[in-house]
Every structure is written in structure tokens, then in C-alpha cells.
Amino acid sequence: MAVEALIRSGTRSGGEFIPIGMDEALRTATMWLSEIRHQGANELTMCVGRQADFHLASDWAQKFGTTNLFADRALSVANAPTPRHENTETSLVLAFGSGTGRGGKDTQGKLALMRKQGAKIISVNPVKSGLSTLADQWLAIRPGADMAVLQVLLGQQPCNYHQLADTGLSVLDMERLVREVEAHQGKITIIAGRGIFSHANGSHTSALLQQFEADILPAADHTNSPYNMANMLDDDCEALLCMNSAMLWHAHSVPALHEYEGRIIALSDHPEGFETCADLVFCGKAEDNLITLAARLGLESFSDAEGNSPYASGYADYCEQAAKASPIPAPASLELHPQQHIEPDTNFPFHAISQKAHEGANRAVVFMNANKAKFLGLASKDIVWVKTADKKVQAVLGLMNDMNENTVWSWGSTLFSSLMPKDTPLRDPTTGQPAWFDLKVAVEKVVIND
């Protein structure tokens, strides 16, 4: 009989556990977490591993009420594809999502070597910045449309205008890219930049990248962790909820955890990794157990009036209902369909993204494609409104030629952060992306009487 749950029976660092049933584990966790939620939801910190469904975790955290949500690495890297090193020779580098990112020195070194050895570099990115400026070819894709391009490259969708209409790429561009991939088969290296998996469909995109017969280099070194655990275990942290997360057991974190006096609850397919620190371990699929725990806690949309979960089959039902409710799919299924792509919004046609600010960067400037601005009757240095459905902020308009026409960007997160929903926990601590590329805005010239 499979072990359903484990509870610590000795000291935190002693590694002594006894098996318990799922009902007892749920009662115990519900008691601990209900008390914390009553005292103050932000006393709970949630840590999510890179193999877990981050968007389910985010949904759960928001319904619980905590904004303390972290991943094993920078938040955007939670959806990253697994690095792979099999090629003995690389003749083509496909870079999705621009540069190699902060902390990606190993990736940068390998890229420099491949370039020196004659590899061709093609960069697919909304803005010609970072690695795109060094590439042999740059393709100005619309943010979030990488998934459609990857499906064509994998032969899962035809290369036609209907399929590519909203990607920003022409059929001719796509046909050339397909021929490049075919010509360099077996000698391809993919760089998975943060711009790829920072979208709500990021885990789907990563799953498609994983299907290529190619090496995969990460955007940041996967041994990096942006937070030292000691900095998270402050006096206000009463409990840790860990979902397939190994961050807590990094060498620099263990001493702080051994002295931690709060509760540690772990949800993991591999509970042996939690044997030295956790108080309570739920074995089995982490997503299923998280949904069951949400129902016991009575979290909104996870529980009906009687405290029962509306997801009879657990995580599978959650994904199916999420897919029906939104054109953006939950990350569980790899059955991708055209209507599941991030669709353009005619009322808010621009994707608002940010770039890491350098010293002296003007954070009040919003950059737009020069031809798009001309079409809209806008000029350089115009004062404009950047608007969502219920919020707006003023900015100075800057113009660029080398960017996708459905994109606007600003230095750092200052300008766009005020447009985000209140208490949004989705913020990348490394790059400062305010919305993971999923913020849609309109841009209008300020009228004097405004």
C-alpha cells in the first residue's frame, strides 16, 4: 500500500517520520493553515518548484490571500524547459526570448564559442535588444505568439497565413525558418530566454521546445536562486507551503531551516527530498493534493458551500475548466489548439513589457514601433496615456524601428506596475517584468483638457 502522507516524529533535522493517512494529514494541514489565514494570510510563504504548475499555485495563493509566492529560481524561470546537452556540433542557434539573462554566464560563454565556430544565430523576439542585436537574423514576433511558431516548426500546424496572421511573422519568414531548421537537423541549439516562458502560456511553450531534437541552454544558470532562505524566514513567516520545491534544501538554506520554528508543509511526488526539514509531507501528485487542501480550507472557486471540491478528478478537472474559462490553457495538457493561443485584443492591442533598466534610463518613456505610431497619428515626445480597462498612466512616447508593432516597452517596472491588478503576486524579482508579458494596453495621445 502506497504511503499517502508523512508526519515528523523527531527533531526537524533528525529525519524521523511516520506514515499517516490522507484524512489525518488534511485535518492537520487545515488546522495549521486556517489559523494562519485567520491571523494574517501573508504569514504563509509558498515555494514552487520548476516542475510544478506555477499558475495553479498562483491561483491558490491569491485565493488564500498571501502575496508571498516564490519559485526555485527567478519566477519567470519556473516555466523554463529542462536544459539538454547532446549535440557534438552546433551549426544553428535558435534564440527565443532574447538574451541569456542575468546569471547566465555559462550560457553566454557557450554561445560565444558556438558563434566563433561558425554557428548561425536566429533570434525570435519582439524587440531587437540583447542577443537580437548580435544575431545573423532577427524576427520581430508578437509577444505570446511563440507557441504558434513552434507548432509550425514541429509540423503540428501548417505554414499558412491563417496560422501566422497574429504572430507578426510573414509566411515567407516562416518558410525560411522551417528550411533552416530542416537543413541543420541534429545540429541545433535552442536558447530559451525569459521572454519565452514569461507568458501565461509559458509552460506550454516550454513543452514544445522540449520536443525539438536540439540542445537547450537556459536563460539563467539553473543553480542560481534569487533568494536566500534566511531572508524569507523573518518574524512574520509562520509557515512554508512547498510544492515540488527543492529550494529549501539548497546548502545555504539548510542552517536557517533547522532553526525555523514555524510549520513546513511539503507537497511532492518524491517525499524523500523533504526528510530533514518538513513537518508534514503529502505524497503523490502535488497539484491534486493542493486542490484537495484548497477545498478543505474553503478557498473561493476551490470549494462549494458544503466544503467539497468542484474538481471531482482533481487537477485534470481543474485544467479542463480553466481551458474553457480562458483562451490561455492551463499547463497540464499538451493537446494544443489554435483557440488556446494568446489572442490579440482590439480594444487593448499592445503587449506592455519592460526591459531591465540601466543607470540613467528614463522610466517615464514608453517605446512604440515608429510606423505604428505614424499610423495612429502619434509622434516622438508626445505625452500619451497608457491605458487598461480601469487604469491609466501618462508617459512620454519614444519611437523605434526595430520592434514588433503590437508591443510597447519601458525601462524597468515603474511605469507599467501601476496598471497591474492590486496585490498581483506575479512579479519577476530578477528582471522586474511587471506582468510577465501578459499585460494588454491601449495608447492614446493626451488631450490638453484631460
Image (cartoon, rainbow, N blue to C red):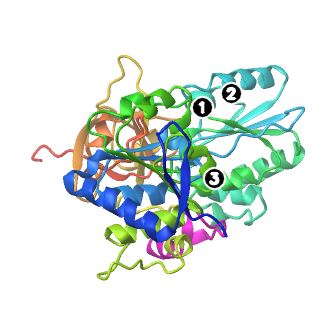
First in sequence, mark 2 or 1: give its number: 2
Q: What amino acid type is highlighted by mark number 1?
A: Ala
Question: Which residue bears the numbered disc 3?
Answer: 270
Q: What amino acid type is highlighted by mark number 3?
A: His
**Which residue does the image show at 57% across and 65% down from the upper left?**
4
Checking the image for residue 220, the label placed there is 1
Res 332 visible? yes
Local crowd size for mark 3, using a 10 Å CA cut-off: few (<14), some (14–19), many (≥20): some
Mark 3 to mark 2 CA distance (whole Å): 29 Å
Name the spot of residue 281 as percent of width and height, x first.
51, 54
**Which residue does the image show at 61% across and 26% down from the upper left?**
104
Would you say residue 338 sits in the magenta stretch? yes
Name the spot of residue 37 as percent of width and height, x first.
26, 56
- Closer-to-camera residue (357/397): 357
Name the spot of residue 53 as percent of width and height, x first.
53, 57
Callout 2: helix, strand or loop?
A: helix
- Closer-to-camera residue (269/374): 269
The quadrant the N terminus occupies is bottom right
Q: What amino acid type is highlighted by mark number 2?
A: Thr
Mark 1 to mark 3 CA distance (whole Å): 25 Å
Question: Which residue bears the numbered disc 2?
Answer: 107
Name the spot of residue 100 as percent of width and height, x first.
61, 30
Answer yes or no: do the residues labelled 1 and 3 have beta carbons within 8 Å? no
Q: In this picture, which residue range is highlighted in magenta? A: 320-341
Above/below status of 436 relative to 131: below
Local crowd size for mark 1, using a 10 Å CA cut-off: few (<14), some (14–19), many (≥20): many
Q: Nearer the viewer, mark 1 or mark 3?
A: 3
Above/below status of 67 relative to 362: below
Above/below status of 16 relative to 297: above
